[in-house]
Image (cartoon, helix red, strand yellow):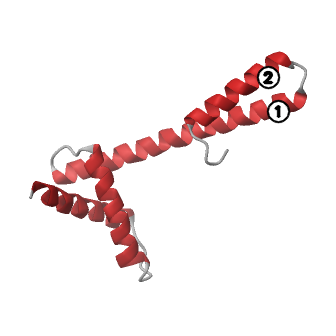
């Protein structure tokens, strides 16, 4: 279940619900259904937290740049910043703060926008 997505959870829950109707007294099946349900709730909560973090990062970046940022451009800049931070800081043994990563995202976003403007 660790690498499951929304669709995987929904299919598993649907299948287990169907099987529970066919075998209502199956304690093991009920236990598996409950585990899947709990894992699905945890999955949804983690996705909500990730979305909140990404929204906050986007708002910070937009405030620093002074204009709205396209989600696709932001994702590209984040990937570029990850590569930059890993290659230039982490490999050399530096600690990386959130502020340093945000700085890298802003720099990469500006560079990316210049490239696509050419």
User: Residue 64, position in %: x, y?
Assistant: 20, 54
Quadrant housing residue 109: bottom left
Residue of label 1:
31
Measured along the vertical axis of the image, is residue 28 above or below residue 54?
Answer: above
**Quick check: 117 left or right of 42?**
left
Question: How far is disc 1 from disc 2 in space, using C-alphas?
Answer: 13 Å
Q: Decide: few, some or many residues near mark 1? Use Cα within 10 Å; few <14, some 14-19, many ≥20.
A: few
The x, y position of residue 81, in whole percent, is 32, 64
| Residue at the farthest bottom position | 92
Q: Position of residue 98 (x, y in %)?
A: 38, 62
Q: Residue at x 44, y 81 (%)?
A: 93
Q: Is residue 1 left or right of residue 100?
A: right
Q: Quadrant of the N terminus?
A: top right
Q: Earlier in the sequence, mark 1 or mark 2?
A: 2
The residue singled out by tag 2 in the image is 19
Residue 39, quarter of the rendered image: top right
């Amino acid at each position: 279940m660790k690498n499951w997505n929304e669709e995987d959870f929904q299919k598993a829950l649907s299948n287990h619900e169907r099987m529970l109707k066919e075998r209502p007294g199956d304690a093991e099946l009920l236990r598996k259904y409950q585990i899947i349900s709990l894992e699905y709730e945890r999955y949804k909560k983690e996705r909500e937290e990730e979305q909140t973090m990404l929204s906050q990062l986007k708002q910070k970046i937009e405030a620093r740049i002074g204009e709205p940022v396209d989600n696709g451009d932001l994702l590209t800049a984040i990937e570029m910043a990850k590569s930059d931070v890993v290659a230039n800081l982490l490999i050399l043994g530096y600690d990386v703060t959130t502020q340093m990563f945000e700085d890298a995202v802003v720099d990469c976003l500006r560079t990316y926008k210049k490239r696509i403007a050419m």
